[in-house]
Structure formats: structure tokens, C-alpha cells
Image (cartoon, rainbow, N blue to C red):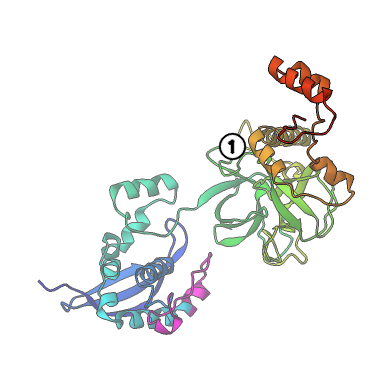
Amino acid sequence: MEQIYVRHVELLGFEKREVPTQHYVYLLMVKWSDLSEKLIYRTYPEIHTLHKSLKEMFPIESGQIEKKDRIIPKLPAPRWVDSEKSTVTRQSTLSDYCHSLINLPPHISRCKQLTIFFKVRPEDENPSALNILKRNKASAEKGLAQGNVAEISGPIILDTYRVIADFTKTSKHEINLHIDDQVEIVEKNPNGWWFCQCESRRGWVPASYLEPLDKPEEDEEGEPDYEGELYVTVNAYKAEQDDEISLELGETIEVIHKLLDGWWVIRKGEDTGHFPSMYLQKSGKKETNGPGRINLQGQKPPPRRSTIRNAKSIHNRSRRRLSQDVYRRNSRRYLEQKGNRRDAKLATKSPLRERKNQDNIPWVSGSSSEGEAKREAPTIPPRPSAELILERCTDITRKKVSIHKSGSGANKPGQKDFT
């Protein structure tokens, strides 16, 4: 039986979906080799995932070996937040991509990966059934367990957080929030500013104003690492609280604890303190903004939790924060233990290896006292006296020596000299 393959793909438009979160899907009319036509719905991230898979499967045709050999069309990466405007502008690009993809050589256009992607899924036949699902995570997981949307790679279920206090935006990129509002987290930036959506509003919010609904602790926030990572300051900061530290531009420090609110604990010498991570960049990397936002100019670090007034948490017990005294004490103990391990390793060096190194020291000529100390000339033992020799001789030898001494002192012909 001849394999059925895709012979044409036509982009008809897009739709806005609200479940489980707001997103957009493209309507694609797929025409197959058996003359059947099927309507499917795919998100842009799904299509881009297919694109990346094809590049991995066909490295030559994707130009990874030689750029001149590339025949697989290019496709821009998806944005981390979709808007209606970006969805509209991408239609022409996506239409051209699908047309070029289907017209590639058969070993690509008819490969198994591409055929499976364009096949009809259960949710394609009944897209309205998605609206029956609730927005909460529990019902979404139930749908996955039943296999209703098991093959969907998106949309992603976003984490829901609660606002602990009123927040007033300070720039057009932020949004106003009120206590008890629930927001969905689109991106958790290491600098402490999180991109959230609250109903139809989207913008940046300080992580210090948010708390998770299900648990008071953040699993993503790891334990301190007293080994430390080298970072360089890209902006000066003057401490405003006792547990913070002041640094100038261009100073090299060690980060020992990365906190989600964007205020990392750093170590400089024996001193530790909180410092805004948006003013740091990893040592050795050519970056201008470090882990901060796109543009540091005019942007301030997010407010710390300790500065928020009238904060109300729904959790009876929040995560206990370490004091700077604890950080300094643990850091000092770790560095001492590290030094002791290094000294112990040097002390256990093989004596034979040390002797070998000493033997390989070159001879230093001249009157240098250092060279003489490294290698001294061998000492010639003194010649024993005649009395000592006579004491250790046998009687026969002693008698011959006595006869020799009683002579005239000159050897007679044929007489041996025993001296």
C-alpha cells in the first residue's frame, strides 16, 4: 500500500483561545495524497518545534554543515508572549514556510515526523470541547490523563500566584495589582521582575509581591553555595538596609545564594550582604545587562519583601530567611575547611617524589651560597695513619713492614715496596 503524504498546506487564518490560558492557534487546511482534506489547529510554538526537529534530522539540508547546502526554509523563533498583532504579522511568514516545506525533496517532505505532525488529532475534530475544560490546573491534568490533549505540546499550564499587597506600577511596562489578585506567571526573570498576566492585563511585577497558592516555600530557590560564583558589577549600588552591601562599578565578587526576589547574597572578602542581581553579570561573559532587564537605564531593583507594608500572606508559616551573621559564619567555616583540605593534600605528597625533585636540581656554579646549600661537593675521607694500619695487619704483614723499615731506606733490586 502506497504511503499517504501531505501534498499541500494552506493557512486559512487564526483563532484566539482562552482555555487553559489565552493563546492563539492557526487554522491549516491540509490536503493529502489520497485527495482528502482535513482542517487542523496548531500553535506557532508547535510549528517551530517541528522546524527544529527537521533541522536535527537533516543537518546537511538545514545548512549546519555547509550554509550553501541549505534547502530547509528558515522560521523565526516564537516570542515568549504572543499578542494578536504578532500573530497577524506572522501569517505571511508561516504561509510561505508551509509552502516551501511541502515542496522539499520527498525524503524530507514525506518523512514520518512531518506526516505525524499534520495528521488530525482528536481536538482538531472537536475544538469547542476545549472550552469545556476549566482553567485550573487540576482539570487540565485530568484531561491529560484521559488522553484528550495528550499530544499537544502547548499551550503551557502557567503557575498561579497570589498578590500579598497592593502594587502601583512605576513604568508603562508594569501593571497595577491589588491584594488577593491572582496572576499567572509567564516568565520568572532572575533579576526579581516577573512577567505576569492578570485577566487581560500583562506586565512586569516584583516577585516580592507574589506568593504561590499551594505552598509557602519555593522549590526553585536552592540552598546557599558557599563555593561561590564569580560575578562583576555592571552598576554601582549603595546599601539602603543593614543586610545589604555597597559596591562600585567593575568590582569582582562571589555569589553564594541566588534568591528569587532578585536580591542575591554575595561575598566580598569576609563580608556578605544582599545585592541586586540586575547589577551583576557573570565573570568572563561579554554582556551588558547581566541577568537584569533589557535596559538598565532608568530601571530600579525590585522592592524587597521587608519594605512592603501591609503584606498579608495566606500561609501560616513562611520560609525562614538566613541572617547575614549566618551567611558569614557558614562562609568562614567553609573557606577554612577548604583550606585545611588543600593543606592536607599537600602534606600527603609522596616523600619519594620530593627526593626525586631534589635530585633533579641542576648544579649551580659560582660562589652562590644558595647553590651550595642545594648540592655540596662530596667529602674525601682522610688517609689512615701508619699506626692504625699496623694494628689491623696480620703478623706476617707486620713482620715484612718491620724488615722494610730496618733497611737502608732504598729498595734493593728485586725488593718490593710495601708502603
Indicate the position of residue 158 as horizontal and vertical percent values. Answer: 49, 53
Secondary structure at numbered mark 1: loop
Q: Main secondary structure of the magenta part?
A: loop
Give the side of residue 36 with respect to residue 296, left or right: left
Instruction: Check if residue 81 falls in the magenta segment.
Output: yes
Q: Name the quadrant of the C terminus.
A: top right
The correct choice, above or below, for 194 with respect to 377 in the image is below
Furthest toward the left, the residue is 1
Q: For the residue carrying disc 1, how many other residues have a C-alpha within 10 Å: few (<14), some (14-19), or many (20+)?
A: some
Q: Is residue 52 something that shows in the picture?
A: yes
Q: Name the residue located 59 percent from the left edge and 38 percent from the top edge.
A: 217
Residue ID for mark 1? 216
Give the side of residue 122 with respect to residue 343, left or right: left
Residue 205: quadrant of the picture: bottom right
Residue 318: quadrant of the picture: top right
Instruction: Check if residue 64 falls in the magenta segment.
Output: no
Q: Using the image as rendered, state which of residue 83 and residue 231 is in the foreground.
A: 231
Indicate the position of residue 372 as horizontal and vertical percent values. Answer: 84, 43
The correct choice, above or below, for 234 with respect to 334 in the image is below
Give the side of residue 284 with respect to residue 196, left or right: right
Q: Is residue 243 something that shows in the picture?
A: no
The correct choice, above or below, for 208 with respect to 25 in the image is above
Q: Name the residue located 75 percent from the left edge and 41 percent from the top edge.
A: 306
Indicate the position of residue 272 as horizontal and vertical percent values. Answer: 78, 42
Residue 370: quadrant of the picture: top right
Which stretch did the figure color magenta? 65-89
Indicate the position of residue 57 as horizontal and vertical percent values. Answer: 34, 69
